[in-house]
Amino acid sequence: MLKLFANLFWIYLPSSFQKQFSSLFSRIFQMKISRYFILPYSLVFGLSANYLDQFEPDSGEVSYYSFSDFFKRKYKSGFDIRSKNIWPCEGYVCDWGLFSEKNNSIVKGQVLDLNEIFHSNPEQTSQHFFLNIFLHNHNYHRVHSPVTGTISKITNIPGGLVFLRPWFYKRADVSFPAIRNERVVFEILDNHHQLWYLAMVGGFGVGSVQIGRNLHPGSEVKVGEEIAKFDLGSTVCLATPMRLQPNRFLQTVNPGEELQPYENII
C-alpha cells in the first residue's frame, strides 16, 4: 500500500509540501514520548544488546531522550578501520556500476545521468564507479570519510523528498530518487590526487543533513572521520576512482569495512 502511495501520489507532490509534511513527521520523533518506540522498534528489527551497546545518545544524556535521539546515536569509542578505503556508513547496497555503463540508462522516460547526483564533471568521472547505499531507519545514520584526503568542494543541492526505499522501485529505477531529492555533496581529493564524491541524499522524514563542525573546502579529513549526519531517513551515494565488486542487491555494509576492489576472474 505504501509503495503505491509513494509511486502514484507522493512523487508528484510539490517539493515544498513534501518538506513541510516531512518536517512534521520529524518533529513527532523529537517528542519525548517517542522514546517509547525505541524498545519495540529494536526488537522488530533485531537490534541486539551487543550491537546497541556500541552507541550512546546524541543528546549526551544517559539514556535516549526521544526516537530522534536514538536515530542520531553515535559510537562510544569509534569503530575499527580495516583499510585505507572504507564503506562510509551502515546500510544496504541497492545499486552499483561503472559511470560509463550506467549514465545512459533510461529511467521513467529520463536519462539517468549519474553526474546529476554529484553535480560532477563527466570528464572527471568517466572511469569512476558508482554505489547507492540505502540507510534504513534502524541503521546508524552518521557518515564518515571513505578515504584520507582534502575536501575540495561541498555543494548543497535543493530538491524534493521522494521515498528512498529501494524495494519501491524496479531495479533499473532504484537510483532515480537520488537525482530528484535534495542532497549535500562532498568532493574529496585523496593522497593520490584522485577525486571521490560522496552525496548525502535526503528522503521522506529528513529535516536536514548536518555537516560536521569546522568542515569546509580545504579541510583535511582522515579515513573514518565523521563528516555528516542525518536527522531522519537517508541514502548515501558514492563515486570512487576504483572499481568495486558488491556481492548482491541489499548487501549489508558497515562503516570501517574495506571497500573490496574488483578482481577479474579468469
Image (cartoon, rainbow, N blue to C red):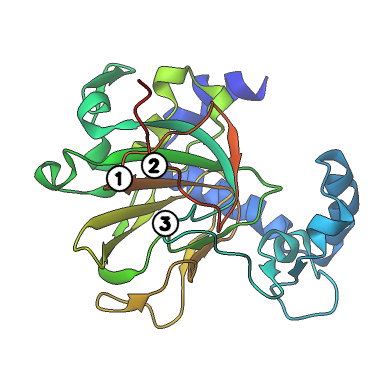
The location of residue 159, given as percent across then percent down, is 36, 46
Q: Secondary structure at mark 1?
A: loop
Looking at marks 3 and 1 on the same chain, the residue that comes earlier in the sequence is marked by 3
The residue tagged 1 is 242
Q: Is residue 86 above or below residue 247?
A: below
Q: Which mark is residue 85?
A: 3
Q: Nearer the viewer, residue 20 or 236?
A: 236
Looking at marks 3 and 2 on the same chain, the residue that comes earlier in the sequence is marked by 3
Residue 192 picture quarter: bottom left
Which amino acid, by three-letter code, is at mark 1?
Met
Q: Nearer the viewer, residue 37 or 154?
A: 154
Which amino acid, by three-letter code, is at mark 2?
Pro
Q: Is residue 20 above or below residue 65?
A: above
The location of residue 163, given as percent across then percent down, is 53, 35
Q: Residue at x 85, y 39 (%)?
A: 44
The residue tagged 2 is 261
Q: Residue furthest left?
A: 123
Which amino acid, by three-letter code, is at mark 3?
Asn
Real-space Cα separation, disc 1 to disc 2, in angstroms: 7 Å
